[in-house]
């Protein structure tokens, strides 16, 4: 393992796909973000991206997240996994063509879950990859589950898991809003954004100390927050930033001043 | 693990790519082979494909097989890995669109090598996959090597490894010639094809009992034979068949009579 500590960067599926169109890619966003990642020139970076309009529709159609119920789902699992590799391939193209030594890691090939939570991670390849200063790129994936047969492993669970596993110095989460709000900024013009929250403050907002599943911050953020809290608890700060706005991810990676929500342990 | 024993099918890179054109795909061959695999309806199948004009040119340009020498190779490794995932994606498309529940497994995500030989295989995901009767599809890949930094893992090494690991009942190797010849059939019209060889006979032909690296059968077959001999030694028969000819792979999978070379232990 290299000595410099790692940053885990999440790029939301909603940022790099077109949510109005199944299998719609937002190439402009992918190209711009690849430019920003190149320019930030961050060493010890792990990238995770979501599925957006690639992974979600087919996964929902076949209820992949709920696990194996009957054989008709097998093709749905295969399709969900496949379309995620296609989206990942487009993202990898953008990185590699810019000269970024990025290497995809397929979560379903090296991880399994038990009732939806990662219970196996064969980390020998990724450790060697990080040692050699490649940039691993993972993604939300259809994975095998030792109880359910299969399920969906979200990019957000991956982010917190990898940050903890590799003792990351920080997490940057690129989403399609400016940060974490008290109500949904997409539907409520009076929504108030938090610039900084401690774990205590976040738990108060979420209404239940520790048990973050009850957290009711909105704007598609509830599950995301529930997933990242364990990393914050281990002392890894999380910065939520708008990845649809030019240079926000770049500035977050560089540690420059930019609008967003910082969540810290204390 | 299912009870029915597994067949490992190798599809040569030369069959599914156009060797005269870097990144040239032979879509006609891919579509036909996907049809044959669908029609054969083989349970407990593991598929491995090679790289052909996808993997080889960029791997050679950056000398990836020889391992890490300097930082200029990092992008070459990333590219080699990436183009293999692209070829695999095209192959997966063809299988899944036909309704075959095929799931790609990325070798570099779950295996490492030591001096070019597989020394780590995190097999938890693929075991679950086989248990659920999905068809795993692997491929020759740029992988991490604990001594060399990185190297190339050939599809042929993968085939023998997986067949041994999962106690396969047989191996079918689809190539671009009719079988194993005493000289190169592409340059020597008098080349004589073997219908069946025992390990003893093969070793005699190769001139050196056991030490199959010295084997000088030609036609691009030398390394292939050297890689599969360990599986034959374990009692797994290998059938080499022409995958460029319609229905040959289908017949080989079904156990029907078709031209080719059978290699058996005794």
Image (cartoon, coloured by chain):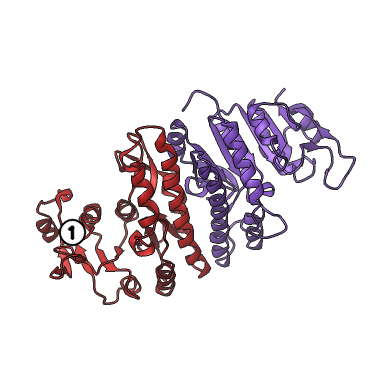
Chain colours: A purple, B red
**The C terminus of chain B, quarter of image:** bottom left
Residues B53 and A52: in front is: B53
* Res B4 seen here: no
Quarter-of-image position of residue B19:
bottom left
Q: Would residue B220 be found to the left or right of residue A44 on screen?
A: left
Q: Would residue B196 be found to the left or right of residue A191 on screen?
A: left
User: What residue appears at the point 51 percent right and 65 percent down from the top-left corner?
Assistant: B96
Q: Position of residue A208 (x, y in %)?
A: 78, 35
User: Numbered disc 1: what chain?
Assistant: B
Q: Would residue A127 be found to the left or right of residue A66 on screen?
A: left
Q: Is residue B181 above or below residue A236?
A: below
Q: Position of residue B250 (x, y in %)?
A: 35, 73
Residues B203 and B217: in front is: B217
**Crowd rating for badge 1 (residues with CA inside 10 Å; few <14, some 14–19, many 20+):** some
Q: Would residue A214 be found to the left or right of residue A96 on screen?
A: right
Instruction: List the residue tagged with mark 1.
Output: B218
Quarter-of-image position of residue B148:
top left
User: What residue appears at the point 43 percent right and 37 percent down from the top-left corner?
Assistant: B74
Q: Is residue B84 above or below residue A176?
A: below
Circle 1 — which element? loop
Direction front: furthest residue: B21
Q: Position of residue A79 (x, y in %)?
A: 56, 61
Q: Position of residue A11 (x, y in %)?
A: 64, 42
């Amino acid at each position: 393992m290299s000595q410099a500590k790692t940053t885990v960067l999440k790029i939301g599926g909603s940022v790099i796909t077109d949510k109005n169109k199944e299998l719609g890619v937002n190439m402009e966003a992918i190209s711009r973000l690849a430019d920003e990642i190149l320019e930030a020139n961050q060493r010890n970076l792990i990238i995770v991206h979501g599925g957006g309009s690639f992974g979600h529709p087919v996964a929902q159609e076949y209820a992949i997240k709920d696990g194996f119920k009957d054989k008709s789902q097998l093709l749905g699992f295969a399709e969900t996994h496949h379309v995620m590799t296609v989206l990942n391939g487009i993202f990898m193209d953008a990185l590699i063509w810019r000269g970024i030594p990025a290497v995809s890691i397929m979560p379903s090939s090296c991880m399994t879950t038990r009732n939806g939570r990662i219970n196996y991670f064969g980390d020998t390849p990724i450790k060697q990859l990080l040692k050699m200063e490649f940039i691993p790129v993972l993604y939300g994936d259809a994975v095998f589950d030792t109880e359910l047969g299969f399920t969906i492993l979200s990019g957000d669970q991956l982010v917190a898991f990898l940050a903890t596993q590799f003792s990351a110095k920080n997490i940057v989460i690129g989403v399609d809003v400016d940060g974490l709000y008290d109500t949904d900024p997409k539907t409520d013009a009076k929504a108030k954004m938090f610039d900084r929250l401690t774990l205590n403050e976040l738990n108060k907002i979420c209404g239940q100390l520790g048990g973050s599943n009850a957290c009711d911050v909105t704007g598609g953020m509830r599950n995301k927050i529930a997933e990242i809290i364990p990393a914050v608890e281990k002392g890894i700060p999380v910065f939520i930033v708008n990845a649809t706005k030019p240079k926000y991810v770049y500035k977050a990676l560089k540690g420059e001043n930019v609008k967003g929500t910082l969540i810290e342990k204390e």
